Amino acid sequence: MSSKSANSYWKANLKIVASLLCVWFAVSFGAGILFVDALDTIRFGGFKLGFWMAQQGSILVFVVLILLYIRLMDKLDAQYGENAKGETPSASGASLEEKEA
């Protein structure tokens, strides 16, 4: 993989990570702290929704985001031609085996 291609791979990777972390922050901070009073007017499973989001919902959203990250990275690896051994492109464009040699 060329250096230009490796750089675009890592930029795309960082974009995915940043966007998923923003979603996680918005859900955990927004639903668990900022909008808790408004969400507490809604009941979910016998509990106030604001409390539930602070205790369980943000954790479940985080697990879903992990699964989404896996799926998005599989697509990104396929787009940039991940090799058969399952290695991802390095930032320098050389595989681990090439660096060791």
Image (cartoon, helix red, strand yellow):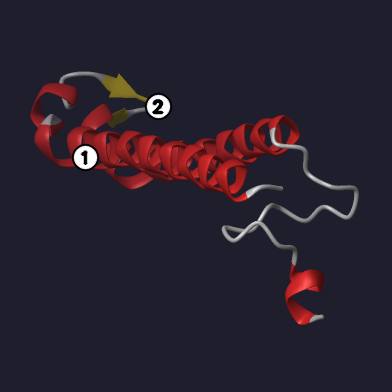
The quarter of the displayed image where residue 4 is located? top right
Along the viewing direction, whichever of 52 and 5 lies nearer the viewer: 5
Of the two numbered discs 1 and 2 in the rendering, the one whose residue sits closer to the viewer: 1
Q: Earlier in the sequence, mark 1 or mark 2?
A: 1
Numbered circle sitting on residue 32: 1
Q: Residue at x 77, y 81 (%)?
A: 100
Answer few, some or many: residues within 10 Å of disc 1's Cα (few below 14, many 20 plus, some between 14 and 19): many
Q: Nearer the viewer, residue 62 or 20?
A: 20
- Disc 2 on helix, strand or loop? loop
> Can you give x and y, in whole percent of width and height, for residue 99 in the image?
73, 75
Provide residue 70's location: percent of width, then percent of height: 64, 41
Q: From the viewer's perspective, is 18 left or right of 11?
A: left
Q: Residue at x 56, y 39 (%)?
A: 69
Up the image or down, 5 lies above or below 90; here it is above
- Residue pointed to by mark 2: 45
Label tally: 2
Query: Disc number at residue 87?
Result: none
